[in-house]
Structure formats: C-alpha cells, structure tokens
Amino acid sequence: AFDSTNEQFILQESQIKNLDDDNKSIVKSREEALLRVDEMDSEISNKSTYLLKLENLLKRAQLDVECLEFSLEQLPRTIFTIFNEFIDFSAFNTARINSHFDEAIKN
C-alpha cells in the first residue's frame, strides 16, 4: 500500500510539475502576445500619424491646385487689363506729346 501511495504521490507531483510548466508556458505566451500587441499598436499609431500628415499634405496640394486654377481663370482678365492700361497710357503720352508739339509750333 505504501508503494502504491508513493507512486500516486510521485504521479501527482509529476502532474503538478507538468501543470506548473504549462502555466509558465501560458504566462510566457501571454507576455509575448502582449508585447506583439504593443508593437502592433505602436505601428498603427505611427501609420495613423503618417496618414494624418499625408492627408494634410493632400489638402494643401488641393488648395494649391485651386489657387492655381483661380489664377489661370483670372489670367485672361489680367492680360486684358494690362493691355487696356498700356493703351490708355500710350494714348495719354501721345496726347501729351501732341500738346507739346502744338505749343512748340505756336511759339
């Protein structure tokens, strides 16, 4: 009976050791999984930051394109205005020159 009890005790001790080893393995796996989750969380955070920066760059580029489109729409009007001002300036100078000639001729 003693041998049987001793064998059961050894068997139970072996089972307890196996359970303890399994528990340690589970704890280690859990810790590794938590580290991987932290790494993935960090990667997601970095990618989110990158995506926000990219979104801001795209918004700025869109504004630049809109400003360029507006400038291009205004370009014909601007050229026309400059041309008219040049004509007006030329006409003013021509009139001034003519009046100087008229005065020179009179004198």
Image (cartoon, grey):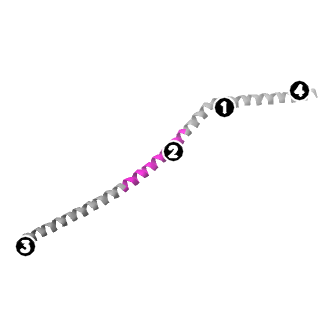
Q: How far is mark 4 from mark 2, CA to CA? A: 66 Å
Q: Earlier in the sequence, mark 1 or mark 2?
A: 2
Measured in 3D between alpha carbons, the distance from the residue under mark 3 to the one under mark 1, in whole angstroms, is 111 Å
**What residue appears at the point 67 percent right and 28 percent down from the top-left corner?**
80
Amino acid on which the number 4 mark rests in the picture: Asp
Q: Residue furthest left?
A: 1
Where is the N terminus found, in terms of image quarters? Answer: bottom left
Q: Nearer the viewer, mark 3 or mark 4?
A: 3
Which residue does the image show at 90% across and 28% down from the upper left?
103
Marks 3 & 1, CB-CB < 8 Å contact: no
- Above or below residue 64? Residue 49 is below
Please rate how many residues cluster around mark 3, counting C-alpha atoms within 10 Å: few if below 14, some from 14 to 19, many from 20: few
Residue receiving disc 4: 102
Identified by mark 2, the residue type is Asn
The picture places residue 95, in percent across and down from the top left corner, at 82, 27
In the image, which is nearer the foreground, mark 4 or mark 2?
A: 2
Q: Position of residue 25 (x, y in %)?
A: 24, 62
Please give the range of residues in magenta.
38-62
- Residue 14: % across, % down: 15, 67
The label on residue 56 is: 2
Of the image marks 3 and 1, the number of the one nearer the N terminus: 3
Question: Would you call the spot at circle 2 few (<14 residues within 10 Å), some (14-19), or many (20 or more)?
Answer: few
Question: Which residue is the site of mark 1?
Answer: 78
Give the main secondary structure, helix, strand or loop, of the magenta stretch: helix
Which badge, 3 or 4, comes first in the chain's sequence?
Answer: 3
Q: Could you say whether the residue bearing mark 1 is in a helix, strand or loop?
A: helix
Q: Give the camera-side residue of 21 and 81.
A: 21
Given the image, on which type of amino acid does mark 1 rest?
A: Thr
Please tell me how crowded label 1 is: few (under 14), some (14-19), or many (20+) other residues with Cα within 10 Å: few
Residue under label 3: 2
Q: Earlier in the sequence, mark 4 or mark 1?
A: 1
Which sits earlier in the primary sequence, circle 2 or circle 3? 3
